[in-house]
Image (tube, rainbow, N blue to C red):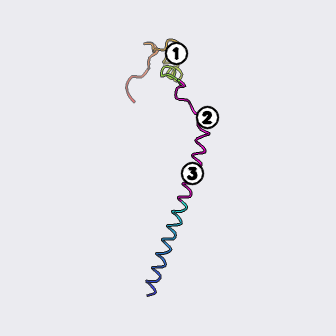
Amino acid sequence: MLKETWWEVVKMEKNTIIAVALGVLVLISLVQAVQISSLKGTVTGGAIEENSGGETYEDMMARMHPDQYKSSSKTPSASSGPKMVGGC
């Protein structure tokens, strides 16, 4: 009898703990949703626009590999080609 009563109390405590944990998780998700929606407005002001052009592949290659790529002609020459062919 005592064992059965104890088990019912433990079951009720488990349910209460689960309900409280679920409530805390829902509350946290609501706070984060509000934070994200307020953050959306501030990020778009400094974001790069879609039609900004950006850097072309040739410009990036000339900037990253100036010894292997001539930026003036925008085309790689045979003499300034890559030193290593193949491999990883």
**Mark closer to the chain start, 2 or 3:** 3
**Mark closer to the chain start, 1 or 2:** 2
Q: Give the residue at mark 1.
A: 71
- Measured from the top left, where is residue 3 in percent x and y? 44, 84
Q: Nearer the viewer, residue 20 or 75?
A: 20
Q: Is residue 53 above or below residue 44?
A: above
Q: Give the residue at mark 2.
A: 45
Q: Is residue 69 above or below residue 6?
A: above
Secondary structure of residue under mark 1: loop
Q: Marks 3 and 1: CB-CB under 8 Å?
A: no
- Given the image, on which type of amino acid does mark 1 rest? Ser
The segment highlighted magenta reads 25-52
**Mark closer to the chain start, 3 or 1:** 3
- Given the image, on which type of amino acid does mark 2 rest? Gly
Q: Majority secondary structure of the magenta segment?
A: helix
Q: Give the residue at mark 3.
A: 32
